[in-house]
Every structure is written in C-alpha cells, then in structure tokens.
C-alpha cells in the first residue's frame, strides 16, 4: 500500500510539473519512467504523446513512443 501511495504522489507531482512547464521534454520522459514498472503502458504512452504534440521536434519523445509501442 505504501508503494502505491508513493507512486500516486509521484505521478501527481509530475503532472503538476508538466502543467507548470509544458515544453520541458524531460518531464514527459520522466513521467512514463515513474509508471513503467507497474505496466501502465497506455498511461505512459498518453503522456508521451502529449509531449510530442507540444514538442514535435523532440527526438527522445519519438524514441520513447517507439519503445512504448
């Protein structure tokens, strides 16, 4: 239970960071990392796709999209 609560807090913090700095590519790369161990690939893919929409030239986001696919 403690790990799940910490994971939810980490996700909430990352979401807030993305809202404050939506063009920071590293935040989109960090968000999926925070959830991949629990196999939430759809969520990670959605976060990554949001980053691609804002930063279409960011190659690391395309690499992450391919890995998530």
Image (cartoon, rainbow, N blue to C red):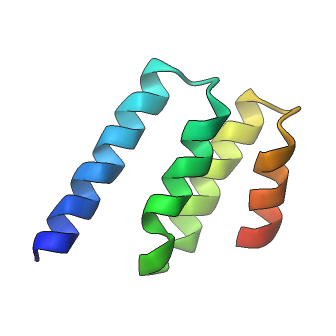
Outermost residue to the top = 20
- Examine the rendered structure and indicate whether residue 29 appears above or below residue 27: below
Residue 17 figure quarter:
top left
The residue at the point 84 percent across, 33 percent down is 56
Q: Name the one closer to the observer, 32 or 54.
A: 32
Query: Residue 61: where, in percent of width, then height?
Result: 76, 48
- Tell me: 62 left or right of 14: right
> Count of labels shown?
0
Query: Residue 52: where, in percent of width, then height?
Result: 76, 40
The residue at the point 52 percent across, 21 percent down is 21
Query: Residue 13: where, in percent of width, then height?
Result: 31, 40
The residue at the point 11 percent across, 77 percent down is 1
- Examine the rendered structure and indicate whether residue 16 appears above or below residue 69: above
Query: Residue 69: where, in percent of width, then height?
Result: 77, 73
The residue at the point 27 percent across, 62 percent down is 7
Outermost residue to the left = 1
- Examine the rendered structure and indicate whether residue 31 appears above or below residue 55: below
- Tell me: 33 left or right of 25: left
Residue 5 figure quarter:
bottom left
């Amino acid at each position: 239970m403690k790990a799940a609560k910490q994971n939810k807090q980490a996700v909430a913090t990352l979401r807030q960071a993305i809202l404050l700095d939506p063009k920071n590519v590293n935040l989109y790369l960090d968000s999926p990392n925070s959830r991949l161990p629990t196999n939430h690939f759809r969520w990670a893919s959605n976060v990554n796709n949001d980053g691609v929409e804002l930063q279409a030239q960011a190659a690391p986001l395309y690499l992450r999209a391919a890995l998530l696919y």
